[in-house]
Image (cartoon, rainbow, N blue to C red):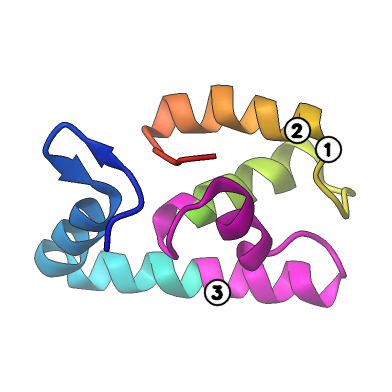
Amino acid sequence: MSLAKIGSKTIDDENEFFSKFFPEEFKKFQEEAERINKELYAAGAINGEVIMEIFKIPPGPQVGRILKFLSDQYPETTELTEEMIEKIKSEVNHKNRIYYLA
């Protein structure tokens, strides 16, 4: 089931393509996202579960990109504000073509 449809492509299609043709890189992305999630969760901060829920996206590289953006821009944050969400939508999503339904 796809979360967003862009023309004839979906987020799931992109993840499937990435995992099928670049399995080692996809696995590295997943492992890095999990590592970041664990670090943030341990610190009581925002994790991938929160990102996926807010942005209505599946697990994958998009989650890692958003978490990286948050750790770079807001290293001490423990919760997302509306301002931060809007900044992510405009900057991270635009630059990395992350599509969501939020």
The residue that disc 2 covers is: 84
- Name which quarter of the figure residue 28 lies in: bottom left
The C terminus is located in which quarter? top right
Q: Residue at x 35, y 52 (%)?
A: 3
The residue that disc 3 covers is: 34
Above or below for 83 versus 26: above
Residue 63 x %, y %: 51, 55
Q: Badge 2: how crowded within 10 Å, few (<14), some, or many (20+)?
A: some
Above or below for 73 versus 70: above
From which residue to which does the magenta span run?
33-62
Camera-nearest label, 3 or 1 = 1
User: Contact, CB < 8 Å: mark 1 with mark 2?
Assistant: yes
The N terminus is located in which quarter? bottom left
Residue 99 x %, y %: 39, 38
Q: How many numbered discs?
A: 3
The residue that disc 1 covers is: 81
- Name which quarter of the figure residue 38 lies in: bottom right
Q: Badge 1: how crowded within 10 Å, few (<14), some, or many (20+)?
A: few
Circle 1 SS class = loop
The amino acid type found where label 2 is placed reads Met
Asked if residue 20 lies left or right of residue 45, the reply is left
Between marks 1 and 2, how big is the CA–CA gap?
5 Å
Between marks 3 and 2, how big is the CA–CA gap?
22 Å
The amino acid type found where label 1 is placed reads Thr
Circle 2 SS class = helix
The amino acid type found where label 3 is placed reads Glu
Between marks 3 and 1, how big is the CA–CA gap?
23 Å
In the rendered image, residue 87 lying in the magenta stretch gets the answer no
In the rendered image, residue 52 lying in the magenta stretch gets the answer yes
> Of label 3 and label 1, which has the lower sequence position?
3
